[in-house]
Image: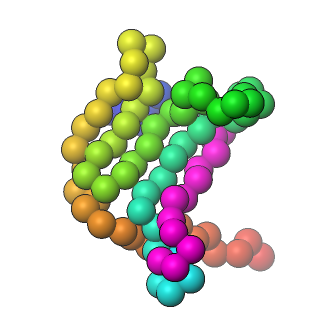
């Protein structure tokens, strides 16, 4: 439903804690940021596309932040891509 809202390119930031990542390479969730403009200083919600956190999905809509429940209740593995040959 929201896939059509994503731009062709965006930044994916995986959120973790040092001790969690170091011990098990796991994370708390992800944040998607727009690549179409430079990051503002100070950082604000204008570049936020969406965030998946334990129990909650945040989607930045023109009318404001929309929330939806997720099945993520704790932490999960980080994304990894196979190296290209």
Q: Nearer the viewer, residue 40 or 63?
A: 40
Q: Does residue 28 appear to the left or right of 69 in the view shown? A: right
Q: Residue at x 29, y 33 (%)?
A: 67
Task: State the image coordinates of residue 80 (x, y, percent, origin top left).
Answer: 58, 71
Q: Is residue 77 above or below residue 47?
A: below
Q: Is residue 27 above or below residue 6?
A: below
Q: Does residue 66 appear to the left or right of 27 in the view shown? A: left
- Asked where in the image residue 57 lies, by quadrant, the reply is top left
**Magenta residues (range):** 6-20
Q: Is residue 3 above or below residue 46?
A: below
In magenta stretch: residue 75 = no
- In the image as oriented, which residue stretches furthest toward the top? 63
Q: Is residue 78 visible?
A: no
Q: Quadrant of the C terminus?
A: bottom right
In magenta stretch: residue 12 = yes
Q: Residue at x 50, y 65 (%)?
A: 16
Q: Is residue 58 above or below residue 74?
A: above
Q: Residue at x 36, y 68 (%)?
A: 75
């Amino acid at each position: 439903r929201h896939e059509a809202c994503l731009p062709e390119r965006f930044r994916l930031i995986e959120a973790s804690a040092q001790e969690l990542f170091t011990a098990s390479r796991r994370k708390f969730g992800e944040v998607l940021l727009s690549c179409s403009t430079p990051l503002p200083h100070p950082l604000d919600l204008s570049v936020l596309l969406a965030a998946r956190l334990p129990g909650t999905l945040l989607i930045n809509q023109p009318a404001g932040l929309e929330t939806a429940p997720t099945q993520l209740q704790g932490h999960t593995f980080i994304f990894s891509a196979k190296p290209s040959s």
